[in-house]
Image: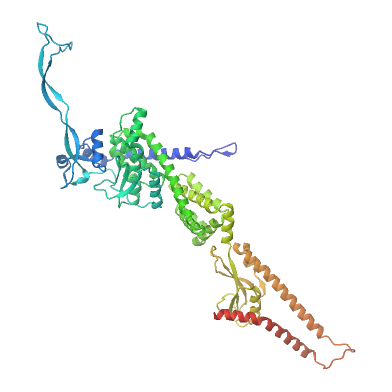
Amino acid sequence: MENNNNVENNETKVMDPAEIQKNKVKEITDKLETGIKELFDSEKYVTWLNTMSKFHEYSLNNTILIAMQRPDATMVAGYTQWQKDFERNVNKGEKAIRILAWNPYKEKVERDKLDPETHEPVRDENGNTVKEVTEVQRPSYKVVNVFDVSQTDGKELPRLGVSELEGSVKNFDIFFEALKRTCPVPMAFEDIQGSAKGYFHQKDQRIAIQSGMSEIQTIKTAIHEMVHQKLHSVEQEAGQKAKYEEKAQTRSEKEVEAESVAYTVCQHFGIDTSDYSFGYVAGWSAGKEMAELKASLLTIRRAAASMIDDIEGHIKEIDLERIESMTSEEAAERLAVKLDNFAYDTDPYSYNDAIDDREQALEGLKHDLITGDKSLEGVEDFLKGVIEADCLESPEAGVLLGELAAFKERYLEPEKAVEASQEATKATITFYVAECMEFPSYGEYHETDNLKDAFEILDTIPPQRLNAVTGIGFVIHDENSAIDNGQYPLVQGGQIQYEAINMVDYYKESPLVQGAVSECEAILKEREATMDSVKDVAAAKSEKPSKDEQRPTKKSILADLKEKKAIVEATKAAAVAPAVAKAKEAQIC
């Protein structure tokens, strides 16, 4: 499908979602038709056709009788025919399927002789009707026994496609649950005897799926049987016949419809069943003209579009239910992982160019989901772009867009967004004092949650003991951030590390870090004022006294300075002692 990039009147033409869906379904069914045509031209089809031509085409009544006795029957033949035409034998103890076979008989009857030209009764010379004895065929039926291929053993029959699909389906549990909710009749797994992978039981109104199959085969088979229920149940057929006065469909037509819809629906959700579906549809087609497929294309497309809408709706419903049972953090982590994986799988080269640390990016996405960050708009635009590109990843992008909408609806309503944001910003900050800021674990090291204590502890560390830069650093404790518990310098050599702090956006915008910077500025300013005051006092007292002043003892200027220095140091030691004791106590603990 081509994107319409024409601009008229400065406005971009936007296609209706329903029209996009319709075009996409048509594109898939066109692909189905092309794939089957190619299969018809293969040697494999010629071999298969030679074998299948030996099977009898049963009447509608017999088809119903077969379905009632053995719903999983696929290819049926008589006991002797299995041996003669297919080199297979009926297994011992198998119960026969009883159907009606045409068995006319001849009888001699007397009737009026008719003139071959006028078709009037011939009369004799006396005017009486001439009689004659003729042999007529009387219609009659007899009960015969037939057996399904699953009840036989022997030479392998040729196949047009693979016998069973292999592979997994993303979010299989959610997808299968969505199918069960879409289906109006019960659907369950069974141990079906024979080769059938599933069946719709007309009488019991239920669907059985063979247990133990691969995820992709299970999904395909479930949709196939759901189509039989949707289009071919007795009630549906009766309604269609009454409405359109059409003759009943043959089994070939029904199987072509069911598998074509299953292929289309699976393809929409990124599940490729072509290896199985092409052969299946070709096998039930009467010839290369594909009359059954072409006659049913409109029905197939309508049924597929309807089922796709129902399935997508139930997937969103299930996601919303699962999200509602989670905490905001659990739901955010789950969705973040899915979005991150999808972005990587869709375009790993662009992802690697844009993301240096995938773990950090994942944490950031989780944080954005919890807080309802505006960056989520970019995520939505990315998913919408993938959907509009109409590629293999488009169906999954649609599912993820629905999950994101459900998450926002559940957790990011205005009042809940505020609560989530407050919860997410419950980060804390602590400080450390290191004798060596380059290698904090080398030399003396203390931790504290009080910045004033940190400065007082710093005063006790000899600045040149290790020939290293002493200082104070901080640690942010934030589980929602990739920098959780990381050490970072705050003050080194008596200088606040403005440049280093502002290089990291988180620190530059963090109220905790910027609050610590402001507190540092106030502490340093206070300490500077204190030192200036001490210097002034010392200078004033060291001046020479006037003659009028009486001094009890005459001291030298040097002695006076030493005395003042001792007083200052004693005062400082008394103030620092409690902080040092507290830090040492924390280290011992």
| The quarter of the displayed image where residue 532 is located | bottom right
**Residue 420 vs residue 477, the one in the foreground:** 420
- Residue 110 image point, x, y percent: 11, 18
- Residue 523 image point, x, y percent: 69, 73
- In the rendered view, does 149 fall on the left or right side of 244? left
**Residue sitting farthest toward the right:** 548
- Residue 1 image point, x, y percent: 45, 40
**Residue 493 vs residue 156, the one in the foreground:** 156
Q: How many tags in the picture?
A: 0
Colour convention: rainbow
- Residue 221 image point, x, y percent: 33, 45
- In the rendered view, does 499 fall on the left or right side of 153? right
| The quarter of the displayed image where residue 373 is located | bottom right
**Residue 95 vs residue 90, the one in the foreground:** 95
Q: Is residue 293 visible?
A: no
In the image, residue 219 above or below residue 446: above
**Residue 52 vs residue 446, the one in the foreground:** 446
**Residue sitting farthest toward the front:** 204
- In the rendered view, does 384 fall on the left or right side of 117? right
**Residue sitting farthest toward the bottom:** 553
On the rendered image, what quadrant is the C terminus found in? bottom right
- In the rendered view, does 327 fall on the left or right side of 497? left
Q: Is residue 403 visible?
A: yes
In the image, residue 4 above or below residue 506: above
In the image, residue 160 above or below residue 486: above
Residue ID at (77%, 78%): 533
